[in-house]
Image (spheres, helix red, strand yellow):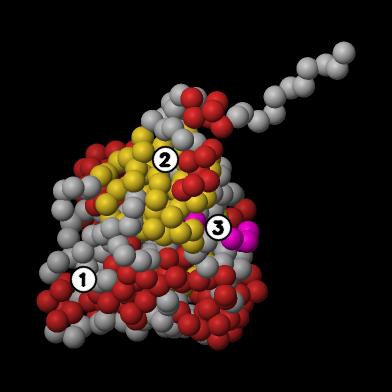
Amino acid sequence: MMPKAHKIRATRDEVLQAPAAPGSLLVIHAAELLTLRGSPGPRIREAAGQLGLIEDGAAYAEGDRIRDVGTTTDILARHPRAGVRLDATGKVVLPGFVDPHTHPVFAGSRAHELEWKAQGLSYSEIAARGGGILHTVRATREASEEQLARDAASRLRSMRSSGTTTVEAKSGYGLRTADELKMLRAIADAGRLANVDVVSTFLGAHAVPPEFEGRADDYARTVEGEMLDAVVSSRLASCCDAFVDDGYFSAEQAGRILRRARDAGLRPKVHADELADTGGAELAAGLQALSADHLNHASAGGVEAMARAGTVAVLLPATSFASHLPFADGRRFVAAGVPIAVGTDFNPNCWCDSMPLAIALACHHCGLTSAEAIVGATINAAHAIGRDREVGTLEPGKRADLLVLDLPSWRHVGYRLSGNAIETIVRQGRIVEDRRGKR
């Protein structure tokens, strides 16, 4: 007598009769489901515009993870039931935006600087007049940790309303050990309060504080010494950044800080060549940094070095817009094989909390196509902050962070300069914002 065979696959009747899994979510009938699936690693050249599009697409999640993605017909055949069902007929569905460069924790305002900009003062001239980063440092040092966290949480909630589900957040307005730690704790608290995934970056080398005026090298050694020791011991940061530019830190000073941070387990990132070519791109490549950001004046050699190293170029067009600076040329990075990401650079000088606006500016002013900008705001941005295994695509095993957009096509993501087309936001498999029928 033959032994009874084990059942390997459930019949269709059993699938249809099975109860919905607890905490399950089903998104069906997306006119365009952008999975962003593709080859491993950051997307470059032709792959920089590949969206992994599925027409009449669907996604199924259990708990906080995506379990299946495909056409609606196929997904419904495998997962006919779910605790929550979203009908995305006529809509665009894509991963939640990943903002790879922000400064959301600060006190005070720089609204008065708008008048100086109107008078034609440059970024450096505003700083020399007492504005800029050091103006914010004074206010942030005086603020309580609780107030910083509350204000930052409000800003993160506004970012989430525009589709950002993962955000990198920097310190850098404390510039003293105790105040930098205060900021990093406020970043962590703000992320929890706002229900946004936050990657914390230590930016002690943001500017030279007043007490070290004229002694930039002494301050850089303080950052790489006692300040970095305290940050590493606190385990409050995943990355370390430095501002390499005229009037801030040299590549040599930043290199010392970032190499020591890397040896201590923090991933390096670089504010590079925003105001002038000061070797920031080359430094980032040499360190195999996660990213070099801004890059308005990056040299040809720096671009080539980044391509060889695989360092992500984070373009921040809202900053150029707000500070009357040249826009980074995205086409030269694409042509060179450098992976491109797009961020808001939200900060008191550039109050842009909208990734859709940053995407549109990247298309209108940095030479990116809509597809390249979407890749830059999802999977490439995830690579720029070391979260590529968790977010940035819609595929099994990734976190169930996704957006339903009330748009006729993905091409409108980079095309539109205003309005909020986001209808539904799902984070970790749960609907956190839903505007269906509320427009």
Residue bounds of the magenta highlight: 33-41
Q: Main secondary structure of the magenta part?
A: loop
* Closer to the camera in the image, 348 or 243: 348
Whether residue 231 is visible to the viewer of this picture, yes or no, is: no
Residue 298 in the image: above or below residue 37: below
Q: Which residue is mark 3?
A: 37
Indicate the amino acid at tag 1: Gly
Q: Name the residue located 34 percent from the left edge and 46 percent from the top edge.
A: 87
At label 1, counting other C-alpha atoms closer than 10 Å, the crowd grade (few under 14, some 14-19, many 20 or more) is: few
Indicate the amino acid at tag 2: Leu
Indicate the amino acid at tag 3: Arg
* CA distance for labels 2 and 1: 53 Å
Q: Secondary structure at mark 3?
A: loop
The nearer-to-camera label among 2 and 3 is 2
Q: Position of residue 352 (x, y in %)?
A: 26, 64
Q: Which residue is mark 1?
A: 130
Classify residue 317 by image quadrant. bottom left
Q: Secondary structure at mark 2?
A: strand
Q: Position of residue 57 (x, y in %)?
A: 45, 53
Q: Which mark is residue 26?
A: 2
**Is the C-beta separation of discs 2 and 1 under 8 Å?**
no
Residue 10 in the image: above or below residue 385: above
Q: Name the residue located 34 percent from the left edge and 50 percent from the top edge.
A: 88
**Is the C-beta separation of discs 1 and 3 under 8 Å?**
no
Q: Is residue 357 left or right of residue 83?
A: left
* Closer to the camera in the image, 228 or 31: 31
Q: Is residue 78 left or right of residue 378?
A: right
